[in-house]
Amino acid sequence: MVIDIVQSAICSLDGTEFTHLAACPVCGGRVQGYDTRTKKYAVIRDGDRERTITVRIKRFTCRNCKKLCNADEPFYPGTRIGSLVVDLFFCLSATMPESRAARHIDALGIRVDRTSWKNYSGRAIPEIPITDIFGMRLPSSVLMLSSLFALAPNGGRIDGADVLNACNFPSALPASGCSIAAPENEEIRNFAGSPSENIQSVTARCPQESTVSPLPPLATSMIRF
């Protein structure tokens, strides 16, 4: 059951488009559309078959500094794996060794190479809302995305703004927030800055026409690294 919930949450993003960027993240200048590219979000394993989950990210150029930048997207800065998968790793590694957490993710049918986990293990991330699902502490975004997918019309895709809302706007974090290595032997990873401030600051940047559908009450809490 947990495998089905996690995989449906990840698969719900397949083909979702992310097209909104209010201003250049470098200088705050006005942006104009450049192109749209397909980006790998995760690889799901179903028996002997693998399925690559991709999203479509619009890119912009800044009229002021000429930088090329992505739309608000479901990735932490400096990472190549979808934020939900990264959140899974940190939620699990908070209660078990990282090597065991990686094996749990593999057992959930998510393929990630060991090098990626080694690269991400020392990164700082914000607080992650968690939910207890059948005895496992998982990111609340897993259940939120699964719910959105279940409510979507047959063959329909989830709106990009709803995905970002469910995932707490991961791309809104400053690049430094995902690249500061934690001191050796330190068990608690701290995020440089208040997560609530980052979420509030990006809310104004994302379209507000659609909102995440309400979910039934759950045993949720926050996990801080």
Image (cartoon, grey):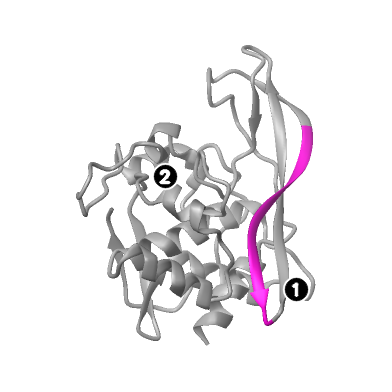
Place residue 19 in its image quadrant: top right
Compare residues 75 and 81 and report the one nearer the observer. Answer: 81
Q: Which mark is residue 88?
A: none
- Residue 181 visible somewhere in the drawing: yes
Q: Three-letter amino acid code at disc 2?
A: Ile
Q: Residue at x 48, y 74 (%)?
A: 215
Q: Which residue is mark 1?
A: 153
Place residue 42 in its image quadrant: bottom right
Say above or below: 197 vs 32: below
Q: Which mark is residue 199?
A: 2
In the figure, is residue 93 to the left or right of 37? left
Q: Residue at x 60, y 31 (%)?
A: 22
Q: Residue at x 67, y 79 (%)?
A: 46
Say above or below: 22 vs 138: above
Q: Is residue 43 magenta?
A: yes
Mark 2: few, some, or many residues within 10 Å (few <14, many ≥20)? Answer: some
In the figure, is residue 169 to the left or right of 51? left
Q: Secondary structure at mark 1?
A: loop
In the figure, is residue 40 to the left or right of 86? right
In the image, the segment drawn in magenta is 35-47
Place residue 28 in its image quadrant: top right
Q: Three-letter amino acid code at disc 1?
A: Pro
Say above or below: 221 vs 69: below
Q: Residue at x 48, y 47 (%)?
A: 170
- The location of residue 183, given as percent across then percent down, is 23, 41
Q: Upstream in the sequence, badge 1 or badge 2? A: 1
Q: Secondary structure at mark 2?
A: helix
What's the CA distance linking mark 1 and mark 2?
Answer: 29 Å
